[in-house]
Amino acid sequence: MILLSPQKRLILLLLAGLLVTVFVISYFLWPHVKLPQNTDATLNFKHMKAEVKEKLTANEKLELIHMFNGKRLILSKAIYSCGFSEDISITIGDCVFHIARDTCNTIYFANAGKYFEVSQKDRLKITQIFEKHGGYFPCV
């Protein structure tokens, strides 16, 4: 066991407190997806001969809002190779989400110009919603 002088203990406690404060503040300042609850949602799928633009049901919309809301945006400037475009997207209110064409778990939030990740389970649910309305994956 290492014995520290009272001054060193105080410095360590202050540093630990400062680190915790920085992490807490950065969590709340980090950009997140924020979606309106009472708005329409539209699914867009345009690939080869398939062209679908349909309003989603209230349950589908709420499921997607629950899935996307609060997701932390990735601040990286990296360009993902999953293939994103408005042709394969979901619009909730005025927020547009491009869904990866190759089934990867990354979503492009067009309004913010940033990406976020969803779980494999959530990605499967997104695929099922698209399939219900005539879309399919992969669509590269």
Image: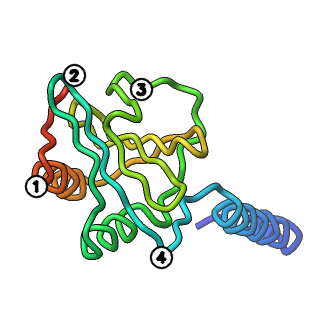
- x and y, in percent, of residue 121 in the image: 18, 57
The residue type indicated by label 4 comes to: Gln
Would you name the residue on which mark 1 appears?
132
What residue is shown at x 18% (from left), y 28% (from top)? Answer: 139
Query: In the structure shown, which secondary structural element does the residue marked by tag 1 occupy?
Result: helix
Would you name the residue on which mark 2 appears?
140
Query: In the structure shown, which secondary structural element does the residue marked by tag 4 occupy?
Result: loop
**Are dots 2 and 1 in contact, CB under 8 Å?**
no
**Are dots 4 and 2 in contact, CB under 8 Å?**
no
Would you name the residue on which mark 4 appears?
37
In the rendered structure, which disc, 4 or 2, sits on the residue that comes first in sequence?
4
**Are dots 1 and 4 in contact, CB under 8 Å?**
no
The residue type indicated by label 3 comes to: Tyr
Residue 14, quarter of the rendered image: bottom right
Residue 11, quarter of the rendered image: bottom right
**Could you tell me how far apart the alpha carbons at marks 4 and 2 are, in whole angstroms?**
32 Å
Between disc 3 and disc 4, the foreground one is: 4
Residue 20, quarter of the rendered image: bottom right
What residue is shown at x 39% (from left), y 43% (from top)? Answer: 107
Would you name the residue on which mark 3 appears?
80
What residue is shown at x 73% (from left), y 66% (from top)? Answer: 25
Q: Is residue 11 left or right of residue 119?
A: right
**Crowd rating for badge 2 (residues with CA inside 10 Å; few <14, some 14–19, many 20+):** few
The residue type indicated by label 1 comes to: Lys
**Crowd rating for badge 1 (residues with CA inside 10 Å; few <14, some 14–19, many 20+):** few
The answer to whether residue 68 is seen in the rendering is yes
In the rendered structure, which disc, 3 or 4, sits on the residue that comes first in sequence?
4
- In the rendered image, the residue lying farthest to the right is 7
The answer to whether residue 3 is seen in the rendering is no
Query: In the structure shown, which secondary structural element does the residue marked by tag 2 occupy?
Result: loop
- x and y, in percent, of residue 17 in the image: 75, 71
Residue 138, relative to residue 96: is it above or below? above
